């Protein structure tokens, strides 16, 4: 909701805000977390740089949650959220 210009345009297209405008950000975070937990296609994959790594779909969830949490000023880092 704080996005402006091109960022807002891209988010609007990606999140389909033209058909369902952004509303309760807490609901968006909750639904994203539920989708992450229910998605059975998420796997680990081998990475030549990191050994085992999340699949691209899992990273999409992580980056989406990072963006949503940043809008609320929440700290989303390995030491605060991901590790626990």
Image (tube, helix red, strand yellow):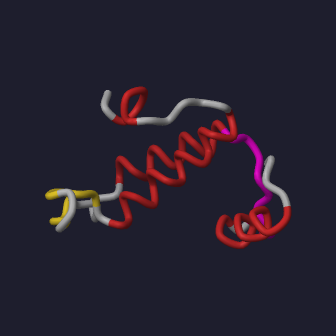
Tell me: residue 46, above or below residue 64: below
Q: Is residue 53 left or right of residue 74?
A: left
**Quarter holding the C terminus?**
top left
Query: Residue 76: x, y in percent?
Result: 50, 35
User: What stretch of residues is rendered in magenta?
Assistant: 17-25
Q: In the image, what residue occupies the spot 70% across and 64% down? A: 11
The secondary structure that most of the magenta stretch takes on is: loop
**Residue farthest to the right, as pictured:** 5
Asked whether, in this view, residue 76 is left or right of residue 27, the answer is: left
Residue 1 is covered by the magenta coloring: no
**Please, is residue 37 above or below residue 14 in the view?**
above
Is 58 positioned to the left or the right of 73 in the image? left
* Residue 56 at x, y percent in the picture: 36, 67
- Taking the image as shown, residue 16 lies to the left or right of residue 41, namely right
Residue at point 60% right, 48% down?
67
The one of 19 and 49 positioned closer to us in this rendering: 49
Rendered image quadrant of residue 13 = bottom right
Q: Position of residue 74 (x, y in %)?
A: 59, 30
Asked whether 84 or 78 is in front, the reply is: 78
Most extreme residue toward the front is 49
Based on the displayed image, in which of its 4 quarters is residue 4 positioned?
Answer: bottom right
Query: Going 52% across and 46% down the picture, which residue do you hit?
Result: 65
State the residue at coordinates (23%, 57%).
Answer: 53
In the displayed structure, would residue 79 be above or below residue 49? above
């Amino acid at each position: 909701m704080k996005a402006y210009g091109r960022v807002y345009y891209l988010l609007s297209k990606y999140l389909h805000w033209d058909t369902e405008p952004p509303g309760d950000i807490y609901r968006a975070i909750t639904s994203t977390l539920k989708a992450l937990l229910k998605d059975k296609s998420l796997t680990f994959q081998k990475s030549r740089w990191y050994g085992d790594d999340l699949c691209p779909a899992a990273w999409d969830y992580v980056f989406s949650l990072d963006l949503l949490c940043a809008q609320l000023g929440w700290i989303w880092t390995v030491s605060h959220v991901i590790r626990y």
